[in-house]
Amino acid sequence: MKSTAFIFLSCLLMAPLAAEEAYLPWRVDNFAITQPLGGLRGDAARGREIVASRERGNCISCHLLPIPEHPRHGTLAPPLFGVGARLSAGELRLRVVDEKLINPATIMPAFYRDPARYNRPHPDYATTILSAQEVEDVVAYLVTLR
Amino acid sequence: MKSVVCAVLLLLPAPLLAWDKPVSGYAYLPEQMQAMQDDEFENPGIYAVEEGSALFHAPGYNGRSCAGCHGDNGSRLDPKAIARYPVYSAVHQGPLTLQQRINDCRERHLDEFPHTYDEPELITLETYVRHLARGEQVNVDVSGPLKPWYDSGKALYHTRIGQLDMSCHHCHDRYVDLRLRDQVLNQGHSNAFPALRMQTGAISSLHGKFRDCYATLRALPYEVGSEEFIALEVYLNARGNGLPIETPGIRR
């Protein structure tokens, strides 16, 4: 009986931890992250949704992208037409993960940076902006822009 | 030859500001909203001014009223003095915002309990008093004792915060006139505040707007009336020196 209660209580305690995936390390080689995060495989269709969604990637708030069903795209960052032809998947991954490693003065948020390094994050947002899977989805989508 | 050109380009000071002359957020509003702000009958912010006027003329705890000293309709208040806030106060050994000044005055001369910062009644009074200086040019002197607060406000303005890891400077200095989705970025001046926000349909104080910005960047905001936000107010008001006061302005 006692042990059942113990297991039940520890499940309760573990629940919030299990909901948040662990932050996965990544390595930069020659201005690219060649290995997919966590060895995950991205899905371009899902990536396209994340790029357009206000809550997740919200890329189109700054970049012009070939997503015509959304009427107004931002103009403060470079258009991304043909970006898949200019940059490799690894180079794109680095730019999504942490553009500040390329341009330290950039306005672009790092979508997969160690949350411990944020300055004054709101407690509701003390995680990476995108999950590792979402980063891979976005990269898979950007690669298709040729 | 090419390398010489590159070297010269590197020596040029980077254009950190996209603007050299302050332009009010008014210029970035759609025409209907500009017309709404200009027309005293259309501008819903005037309700707050009317309410503030009632408070200004109402007797306080000891029976005296703001109007008792400052004249009916604030006739003895100098718009030029209102435009100088925040000012340095020797008593407080620091900056004093217009709202703090009003709160202080109520406590000392009307025997009222002081309000906490940004209490609705205080924002209403601030709106009324600042409205009296509508059209007056913002004129904050930061060459003297306010300089340290100006500097720390400026540092805060340039500090990256929150999950999005951007600073105020990124949007309101570097990318002014460009579009974030369908919204053109303005220079982020404070001359319209307290202002009527279209998003909420209510009057918002400047510190309330700061908290909103922090939430947008998914950052943990400071408290209204905190040392940090007061320093930011000193910096922002001085940064917009020369702009006409528009209280109550209309903003998104």
Image (cartoon, coloured by chain):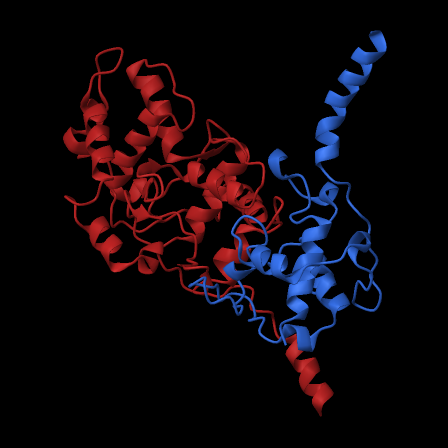
- The chain drawn in blue is A
- Residue B37 placed where, x, y %? 23, 49
Position of residue A71 measured from the top left corner of the image (x, y, whole percent): 42, 63
Q: Residue at x 43, y 57 (%)?
A: B187
Q: Nearer the viewer, residue B54 or A18?
A: A18
Q: Residue at x 62, y 72 (%)?
A: A145
- Please name the color used to draw chain B: red
Left or right for B94, reference B164: left
Q: Is residue A95 above or below residue B53?
A: below
Task: Work out whether residue A63 or residue B172 is closer to the camera in this orientation and state it.
Answer: A63
Give the camera-side residue of A56 and B115: A56
* Residue at 43% over, 65% down: B177
Q: From what the image shows, is residue A21 above or below residue B6?
A: above
Residue A82 in view, yes or no: yes
Q: Position of residue B128 (x, y in %)?
A: 25, 34
Answer whether residue A104 is visible to the viewer in this image.
no
Q: Relative to B99, say whether B30 is above or below.
A: below
The quadrant of the picture occupied by the N terminus of chain B is: bottom right
Left or right of B12, for residue B127: left
Q: How many marks?
A: 0
In the rendered image, residue A26, in percent from the top left (x then y), is placed at 82, 54
Q: Quadrant of residue A90?
A: bottom right
* Residue appearing at x 53%, y 33% in the figure: B227
Q: Residue furthest bottom?
A: B1
